[in-house]
Amino acid sequence: MAILEVADVNKRFGGLHALHHLNLQVEEGTTHAIIGPNGAGKSTLLNCFVGRLIPETGSVTFNDASLLGLKPHQINQLGVSRVFQTPEIFEDLSVLENVMIPAFAKADGAFRINAWQRMESRAEICDEAKHILEEMGLVEQREVLSSTLSRGDKRRLELAMCLIQHPKLLLLDEPTAGMSRADTNNTIELLKGISEHGITKIIIEHDMHVVFSLADRISVLAQGTVIAEGTPDEIKGDPKVIEAYLGGELG
Amino acid sequence: MFGNSSRADWIMLIAFSAFVLAAPILLKPFGAAYPDLLQKFAIYGIFAIGFNILFGLTGYLSFGHAAFLGVGSYASVWMFKLFTMNVIPAVLFSIVVAGLFAYIIGFVSLRRSGIYFSILTLAFAQMSYNLAYSVLTPITNGETGLQVRQLVPADRAADYVFILRDEDLRWVDQAFGVVEEGIPITNLFGMKMSGYPGFYFCAVLLILGFFIAMRIARSNFGMVLKAIKSNQNRLSYTGVNTRPYLLAAFVISGMYAGLAGALLAVTDPLAGAERMQWTASGEVVLMTILGGAGTLLGPVLGAGIIKYFENIFSSINDTVLENVFSFLPTTLQEISIAVTSMFVGEGWHLTLGLMFMIIVIFLPGGLMQGLNHLIGLFKRKISTKSVSADSSG
């Protein structure tokens, strides 16, 4: 069953046709990679999923509900979490607080004033936060200010912030961009590890090594449209993909 | 309901309360232990605590908070004029009116963030200030300011329902048969709110305000506000609708300002439009930054220091300086007086400005950062075992 369905989506920026009659289906429980050369429209597509951009035509449906016109917090409340290209965390707060905020957002909804109770008095959320930090190997650093974490640990923290919400769909925007080979491999291991949670994942990625290590299915984007789709093995041998990456004209 | 605060918070609250209640004794060596000034410390402390809930926690810098101060004062004086000189209804009414006013201004201003938010709040405050002088004269009594006056003679009372510039009604007091001689003083069920009783009334409300602010800062709500300051974008992708949280913080801080405005009217039943001017809004920003934005004690400390400078430092004149430097030879004495007089008396703004610059440059976290640093050093000295001193108070 398709958890996310993108049908005939068009998006223009002035003269640039960023997304051109784009169709995409993401099956539940899979890791779906979206690859493509620079300017292919990968980030534009992701921004249409999270409510930052609204396409001119077409539809984006998640679990049979349209995502178009919803605000980012509403989409998150439906069960879509995202990881940013550079880790976006609450740098002025402690590691534990960083994971407690998304847990509260999940438990209490988008807005609920709870100005009298101390945060720590919600035991079930505290325990869950500590549990997820343990899983991510950050539990020792839970009282530390999160801005002092290393880049790799910030990535782990951001993942923990997403996972504590038990999302149905996790969007990963170039999770290894700008990382060293060793960090990249660590991140791959981390992402493989969270497959056990049974979360559907969409990965946008440049690095083929990452894509072929993680993806169950791959969609190749070029010039705003899907030019190929299939299993990693199918994509590896597809001449259209090689052509797109080498910058040749599309037939 | 009171059992949730941690030990450190209780200690801080008790120490704070003790200090505030003992202020008339503790501040004597500084020459600041007279009720008028102590009241100002407490009132502006409340104002700054409230401002800090918005600015310190969410990072949204409002440049129009004096508007709520002014609205609170007007609301109080109207309660005094129309109903009773008892301060409780006036204080409650002011908080409600300032809260509603803050809701309206916040609803519009919070559509923008950063500098645009600041400019919008500034525009609203200046608008209120100018309206108070012009269109709203029937409510504000324009330049003269709204004052508590003598009662209207009973035979003319009916004519005076809407025009109350020079004479008051005080229906409730009249119904209870309170006899007034001349212009009455505000009271708390008969206890006159001038001098030390007035200060203690403000002090109790300061402690209460501090306690509530502390609970907010430690709560889930406060944590979301801090997260807004830290990374609002991430927060909305985390499923939190940030706008209503901001509006709630804005309204709460507006209510604190309304309370401060009411207390200004309680200690001196007069409300003028100059209370809403942008300089007054700027002052509370200075207080908060000077003491330490985002800390609990910082804003009160900043408010105290600025009011101290305004009232004590500014009253040091050449005669006082002559006494101080009397031990020097005449020429040296004259030079010393000439130099120091630039910094005191009329020149107190210069001292404050220099101090503000030094603090912002060297202690961006305000005086509380410096204080925590000192405590940290001290702790490290006494406990040589633990090398890492955690000084986040």
Image (cartoon, rainbow, N blue to C red):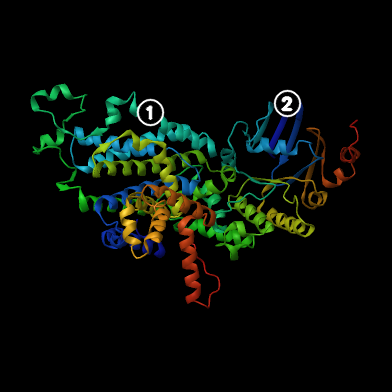
Residue at coordinates 67% horizontally, 46% vertically from top-left?
Answer: A84
Which mark, by number, is residue B130?
1
Judging depth in this view, the residue of B235 and B64 nearest the camera is B64
| Residue A96 in view | yes
| Number of residues whose C-alpha sits closer than 10 Å to that of mark 2, classed few (under 14), some (14–19) or many (20 or more) | few
Judging depth in this view, the residue of B122 and A102 nearest the camera is B122
- Side (left or right) of B375 relative to A235: left
Quarter assignment of residue A75: top right
Residue at coordinates 89% horizontally, 32% vertically from top-left?
Answer: A250
Judging depth in this view, the residue of B344 and B321 nearest the camera is B321
Tag 1–tag 2 contact (CB < 8 Å):
no
Residue at coordinates 82% horizontally, 52% vertically from top-left?
Answer: A209
Image position, residue A206 (x, y; %): 79, 46
Which residue was labeled with disc 2? A14
| Residue B5 in view | no
Residue at disc 2, secondary structure: loop
Quarter assignment of residue B234: top right
The type of residue carrying mark 1 is: Asn
Image position, residue A196 (x, y; %): 68, 55
| Number of residues whose C-alpha sits closer than 10 Å to that of mark 1, classed few (under 14), some (14–19) or many (20 or more) | some
Q: Quadrant of the N terminus of chain A?
A: top right
Image position, residue B372 (x, y; %): 47, 63
- Side (left or right) of A229 relative to A25: right
Residue at disc 1, secondary structure: helix
The vertical placement of B25 against B38, above or below, is: below
The type of residue carrying mark 2 is: Gly
Which mark, by number, is residue B293?
none
- Side (left or right) of B278 relative to A211: left
Judging depth in this view, the residue of A7 and A27 nearest the camera is A7
Image position, residue A72 (x, y; %): 59, 38
